[in-house]
Amino acid sequence: NAGVTQTPKFQVLKTGQSMTLQCAQDMNHNSMYWYRQDPGMGLRLIYYSASEGTTDKGEVPNGYNVSRLNKREFSLRLESAAPSQTSVYFCASRVGRVNTGELFFGEGSRLTVL
Amino acid sequence: RKEVEQDPGPFNVPEGATVAFNCTYSNSASQSFFWYRQDCRKEPKLLMSVYSSGNEDGRFTAQLNRASQYISLLIRDSKLSDSATYLCVVNAGGGNKLTFGTGTQLKVEL
C-alpha cells in the first residue's frame, strides 16, 4: 500500500545549495502535483504534470524546476535554495480525468533553508 | 480576490454540536469541488466530493451554490475526532489544476 512516496522527509539546506525532492506513485495515475504549505497560506501549487511528458506552472513556480521522469515519478528541484523556500512540500497524484477528484498525497517533505 | 477563500477559524465547538463552514470561489467556470481534511502535521485526505445536487456522507453534508459561488460543509453531532483543518478544493476554471483554500480549523471540545 505504498501510494505516493516522497523522499526525503526532512532536509536542512544552506542558502544557495541545491537539492531534488523525489516523488513516486504506484497507482498508475496520469496527473502529478507539487504543492508547498506555509502557515496561514494553505497549500499552493508549484508545478503540475497532467500526463507523462507534460509539465505546467502553478501559482508559485519561481525558484523551482520539475521533471516528469516517467509515469510514476515527478521530481522537484531547487537549484539555489533561499530561506523563503523553507516549507512543507507535498507531492500528490490523481487519475487525471476531469471531475475525478481525489488527490492522493505523500506524507510531506519538511525543508529548512538556513 | 483569491481564487478560493475560507474563514480560517478556529471554530471551537462542544461535542455533539452542529457546525458549518463555507468556502467561496472566484472562477465561475469551476467544475469540480471537494472537501479535504488535514490533521496536524499530516497530509490532506479527501473527505468528500461536492455534487451539484448536494450530497451526504453520514454526519457530513456538502452543498454547492453555483449562483453565489460557494460550497459548504455541515458536520452534525461533532466528535472529538473531527478536530482538524478542513480544506476547500476547487478546480478553478476546469482541467487538472486544483486550488486549495487556506483551510478552516475545527476544534471539538468536551
Image: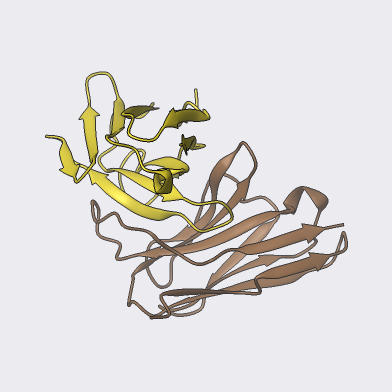
Chain colours: A brown, B yellow
Against A14, residue A84 (above or below) is: above
Name the residue rendered at 38%, 62% in the picture: A50
User: What quarter of the picture does the N terminus of chain A occupy?
Assistant: bottom left
Left or right of B10? Residue A99 is left
Q: Residue furthest left?
A: B53
Viewer-proximal residue among A77 and A55: A77
Against B48, residue A5 (above or below) is: below
Q: Residue furthest front?
A: B110
Q: Position of residue B93 (x, y in %)?
A: 33, 38
Name the residue rendered at 29%, 66% in the picture: A95
Q: Position of residue B60 (x, y in %)?
A: 25, 40
Q: Position of residue B39 (x, y in %)?
A: 50, 52
Tally of numbered discs: 0
User: What quarter of the picture does the C terminus of chain A occupy?
Assistant: bottom right
Give residue B77's quadrant in the image. Answer: top left
Name the residue rendered at 22%, 26% in the picture: B66
Viewer-proximal residue among B15 and B22: B15
